[in-house]
Amino acid sequence: MTRLAASAWCLCLFAGVAEAHETMRIAMGPEVAAVEVSAQGLQVGEDDDEGGRFEALGERATVTLVDGHLAVDGKPLPREALRFRATTPGSLTALGTRVHGDVVVLPGRAKLVAVNVLPLEEYLVGVLGSEMPKSFPLEALKAQAVAARTYALSKKLEQYGQPFHLGSSVISQVYKGLDVEDARTREAVEATRGQVLTWMLQPIEAYFHASCGGRTESGADALGRELPYLKPVDCPCGKLPTSHWTLTLPAKELAAIFKKAGGLEVQGRTSTGRVRRVAVGPRSVDAVTFRERVGYMKLKSLDFEVEKARDGWRIEGHGFGHGAGLCQWGARVYAEKGWGYEKILQHYYPGTELQTLYE
């Protein structure tokens, strides 16, 4: 089978999956010892999509493991997974998050995993309200909706048949359920329903980030993979005050993080000027690892300069995130200049096609 034929087959299969099921399975957090589920008219049944038999539970239940088996309020149930739903839409809550759809609880590697099973478009409304400020222009929100849908569906295809397709944190796409939805995020999702970015007839890995600092990063340098649609492009976000940040990193904190006292020095940069490696004392550290260890919210990007301060180091940087793909603050600026979401997407994912996989 040629590469083109394989891509066409993949897209046909993918479109069929989206049309037939159009659902996502989202892990609601890390594994926990107990999952409390509540709803008006709480019910429990098997984990399937065939609408099987469900039993009434009242309004609240706690799921635990008893002797390695799932138990509801201490009573073991002989099932591999339990699926909870509400008779009153919008009232189902698990792990403190109110959600659409159902919640499946199943054993993880050591404890329990709660998985929200819900329609794809409803999931996207929750993602959009979590990932981008609702006050952003509608065209920017639409661009984010397409990127988030594309990313979600590519991961669904990749994880098809697994207990869940994505997590709900920044490692995947931030998803906070019903409480972050509003009319503008729903409008952006509905206006782009079923629209996905493709390359060679396959959904792309549509990465995005908050702010690139003036120029996006390549897929090879940001993610370790050469993706033809993730090329460095200029971006207007670098002129925004929100793009600039400063971090003071005390010498004691650096030594505690890396178990080694010493200096801090940039050893290499990518073509866009982002740090590739740093020297921490005598040790050479990959910059991605360095940011992870220091903390993503503290060291906001790898576009930074280091200078010695009295009791440590002063780090001045630009941008927030890995820098690949859609820049959210850049999308805002372009939307304010009158760009439509299609033009915004073509700028940040050059060479891709916008296709409607389902309606």
Image: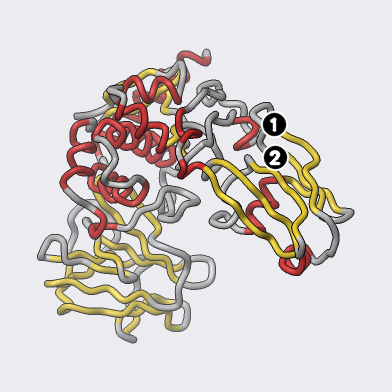
Q: Position of residue 177 (x, y in %)?
A: 28, 57
* Residue that sits furthest to the right in the current view: 282
Q: Position of residue 226 (x, y in %)?
A: 61, 26
Q: Is residue 185 above or below residue 176?
A: above
Q: Nearer the viewer, residue 226 or 295?
A: 295
> Residue, x 40% and y 20% (percent of image)?
346
The 10 Å Cα crowd at callout 2, few under 14, some 14 to 19, many 20 or more, is many
Res 206 visible: no
> Residue, x 35% and y 67% (percent of image)?
105
Q: Is residue 155 above or below residue 344?
A: below
The 10 Å Cα crowd at callout 1, few under 14, some 14 to 19, many 20 or more, is some
Lower sequence index among marks 2 and 1: 1
Q: Is residue 356 left or right of residue 111?
A: left
Residue flagged by tag 2: what amino acid is it?
Answer: Val
SS type, badge 1: loop
Q: Position of residue 237 (x, y in %)?
A: 46, 34
Mark 1, residue position: 270
> Residue, x 57% and y 41% (percent of image)?
318
Which label belongs to residue 289? none
Q: Position of residue 166 (x, y in %)?
A: 42, 50
